[in-house]
Image: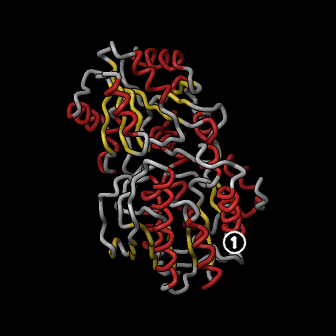
Amino acid sequence: MRILLLNQCFYPDVAATAQHLADLAVELAAGGHEVTVISSDRGYDNPEIRFPRRETWRGIKIIRIPSVSLGKSSKLRRALNFATFLFVCALRLLLLPRFDVVVALTSPPLISVLGALFVSLKGGRLIFWVMDLNPDEAIAAGWLKENSFAAGAMSRLLAYSLRHAERIVVLDRFMKQRIVAKGIPEEKMVTIAPWSHNDAVRFDPVGREKFRLENNLSGKFVVMYSGNHSPCHSLDTLLVAAGKLADRDDIAFCFVGGGSEYEKVKAYSRENKLRNILCLPYQPLSELASSLSSADLHVVVMGDAFTGIVHPCKIYNILEIGSPVLYVGPTTSHVVDATAKLEDQDLICSVRHGEIDKAFDCIVAASQTATRRLSPSAIKVAATFSREALLPKMVELIECSPNGAFWSSPLVSDSKAQSLS
């Protein structure tokens, strides 16, 4: 099959959607498919990083297109960044031939519209992999007014994509509920969570000590927030708790990653003279096991208004290394669903946004644990979100034709098709 993948970020970018799409592309190419990717020639978090415009990587044809980079300091700048990418992407799509399947993600917002127009014009099937929902996210964040012209126009474009998609991949039951509420039949949807990187991430005691030594964390209880620092998921509760623990030399807070709120974390640390906060950039996948293993307590944050709109997937890698978790967020979310399966509920401490004293108490209580525990319960739950468990479902969905038949690769042995329910 000839398969086209559409997303702003792709290998070697470190953004989560880039990594998951790269996993899918490699698996499809290994199965005998002809895979083409259209993405940006700039790094998602650091646009100063430039990638080759044309590249063939592991049998995958990558077409990277130019766009402006005005930064993320304002809504207008973000909108212009997205608009220029979409414009150039639309022009590039006009020059491409028909593909059997087009898989469109959600970066930039509504790139799925281009995928829907492409298959309408040239044929093929559209699979819409919904990593986040817009304009729902922009409205929930207060960037758009719900009754504004822009919100209405974006809602109609989203509905167009949803209607024209043959199948829609949602990340959790809450996202499915939101899309059903938009009038889309439930039977079009398949729930597949973003898989963990269990092929690269596992508890690494040697890497743990090496990472801690390199970053002056040896002998300390390390509280870590790792991943995208998004404005959708306020870190205020964690930062204020860190401030209250500033006199504890044995407790350190490590913020690893990037995103628009990353600089705010560094500014908060400077302004409040907090020597217990360490900020580090995104770690390459080869070092992710070491950095995640270095923490004694991982923090997962979910914005109250964003359940079913966005899906922070860091919880799956955290479960993979068997780490205790401090969850800051609403009482209903995919994080709550995942951690509810833990046999050892002592691994999870949940607080609401603004419950600073409770977060403080959770951190202090966790720091009194004598040794870092490796939880078999967490690892057992993590297996259900592993690459081996979930990636084949994505491949199967793409290979399944509308009449229920499956594409059969000459490179692999036949196997009985499994239900996608």
Task: Using the image as rendered, state which of residue 78 and residue 390 is in the foreground.
Answer: 78
Expressed as whole percent of the image width and height from the top left, the position of residue 117 reads 62, 77
Quadrant housing residue 408: bottom right
Q: Residue at x 35, y 35 (%)?
A: 293
Vertical comparison of 356 with 375: above or below: above
Task: Using the image as rendered, state which of residue 264 and residue 339 is in the foreground.
Answer: 264
Q: In the displayed structure, does residue 284 sit left or right of residue 362? A: left
Vertical comparison of 344 with 279: above or below: above
The crowd level at tag 1 (other Cα within 10 Å; few <14, some 14-19, many 20+) is many
Q: In the displayed structure, does residue 213 sit left or right of residue 60? A: left
Expressed as whole percent of the image width and height from the top left, the position of residue 46 reads 34, 53
Expressed as whole percent of the image width and height from the top left, the position of residue 286 reads 30, 50
Q: Residue at x 25, y 36 (%)?
A: 211
Task: Using the image as rendered, state which of residue 254 and residue 157 is in the foreground.
Answer: 157
Vertical comparison of 63 with 110: above or below: below
Q: SS at mark 1?
A: helix
Q: Residue at x 47, y 17 (%)?
A: 360
What count of labels does the image hold?
1
Q: In the displayed structure, does residue 333 sit left or right of residue 81? A: right
The amino acid type found where label 1 is placed reads His
Q: Residue at x 43, y 31 (%)?
A: 298
**Which quadrant, please, contains the C terminus?**
bottom right
Colour scheme used in the picture? Answer: secondary structure
| Residue marked by disc 1 | 164
Vertical comparison of 335 with 362: above or below: below
Expressed as whole percent of the image width and height from the top left, the position of residue 392 reads 54, 62
